[in-house]
Amino acid sequence: MPTERFQFTGEGGHQLAAALDTPDGPVQAYALFAHCFTCGKDVLAAKRIATALAAKGIAVLRFDFTGLGSSEGEFANSTFTSNVADLVRAADHLRETRGTPAILIGHSLGGAAILAAAEKIPDAKAVVTIAAPADPAHVTHLFGDRIEDIRKHGKVEVQLAGRPFHIKREFLDDIAEHGLMAHVAKLHKALLIMQSPTDDTVGIDNATKIFVAAKHPKSFVSLAGADHLLSGKRDAAYVADVIAAWAEHYIEPAAVQPAAASEAPRNVVVRETRNSKFQQTVTTGPHQMLADEPVAAGGQDSGPGPYDFVLAGLGACTSMTMRMYADRKSLPLDRVTVTLKHSKVHAIDCEECETREGMLDQIDRVISIEGTLDADQRKRLMEIADKCPVHRTLTSEIRIVTKAAD
């Protein structure tokens, strides 16, 4: 998926580094993603979830909070309150330059920040938390042995995930003041809580507290087997799949403009998702789907295979052509069903084929015609089936021109 990188001004006046992962085709919705404590926008979980959502038509804005990643400012001067304010600024920037942030997603402390920021982003319809603490002060357990030193000296360097960070007394005071459950109780947005029961960093009891405090509509999904950082690629892909399916019920679908009759043929764009060995996104106009190989061939069977798409094209064209003819001739055709299969056969076994050696591609097409038609009408419809444009393309000389992209 294409990723656009830019900057916007945060609450403290610093330039914050952002990335917007966009679909190859039309955007169905915009989402804002808040990463975990001391992480950055390019942490694996954020990147993988954003990429997977973009493949489903949801554009995702992720950014580095003050003092993290490529953003300006000092991390030591940031607080939970400033992170919430930066999320609101990010939502404003997205709204002003792209579109309304319909979905808010937060991972770990980012989930707590999203819950606190949600009421200040009124046009958002759906909120998702992933491994979020019920109390922002939960993060202090990461440096619990240094809390007394921080309060005594005002600022202390601590090691978090093997990296040094300065934590100030103001940070401790700020998170102690936040009663997150009050924000959850008056959320007034659809809420999806995702949590692993084996998360050693943020326990499952945090999800329970958030769920109990929230009003309906609310949902809970267990991320069984996942760790706190969603380091498994399949876990991140699963999270994205669930978010996309769940959010569709609560957000307004993007309007699709009908194509003009004289519009030129649309491009078909196929791009690797890198979520598995063979998985691809297939985009044409406003339509998106997945392509894959069966498990037996090394894929995950998450979508039709290449030959499945070929057969689908022929089958759809066959049925549409027969329908057009029947309507034009006022034939009592109720329904057409086309069943297709691709195989390889020995050329020598095909009496009408010019090629006599090796193997040939064969497509078996079985057409079921429903309706009160007489024998002549049925015969004519079967003849029309062979006149569909895709049939003619597949049985004529085909020239494929391949060149490298500029």
Image: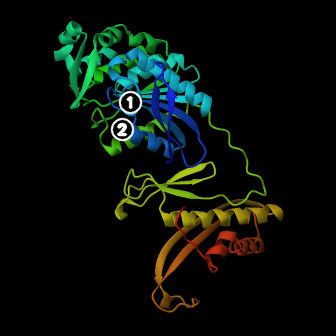
Q: How far across and how far down the image is residue 274, in percent?
A: 40, 52
Residue 141 location in percent, x, y? 22, 19
In the displayed structure, 168 sits above or below 240; it is: above
Neighbourhood count class around disc 2 (C-alpha, 10 Å): few under 14, some 14–19, many 20 upward = many
Residue 135, position in %: x, y? 33, 15
Q: Is residue 320 above or below residue 128?
A: below
Residue at the (54%, 69%) spot, across then down: 403
In the image, which disc is placed on residue 35? 1
Give the image's coloring scheme.
Answer: rainbow
Q: Disc 2 and disc 1: Cα gap in Å?
A: 9 Å
Give whichever of discs 2 and 1 has the lower sequence position: 1
Nearest to the observer: residue 164 or residue 285: 164
Residue at the spot of label 2 = 45
The disc at residue 388 is: none
Q: Quadrant of the C terminus?
A: bottom right
Judged left or right of residue 161, residue 66 is: right
- Mark 1 residue type: His
Asked whether the residues under the numbered discs 2 and 1 touch, taking CB atoms below 8 Å apart as contact, a structural biologist would say yes
Q: Secondary structure at mark 2?
A: helix
Q: Is residue 207 visible?
A: yes
Identify the residue at the far right of this view: 329
In the rendered image, which quarter is residue 129 located in? top left
**Residue drawn at (30%, 34%) of the image:** 229
**Considering the numbered disc 1 on the image, is that residue within a helix, a strand or a loop?**
loop
Q: Is residue 301 above or below residue 65?
A: below
The kind of residue tagged 2 is Ala
Front residue of this view, candidates 32 and 194: 32
Residue 127 image position (x, y, % from top left): 48, 25
- The image quadrant that residue 176 belongs to is top left
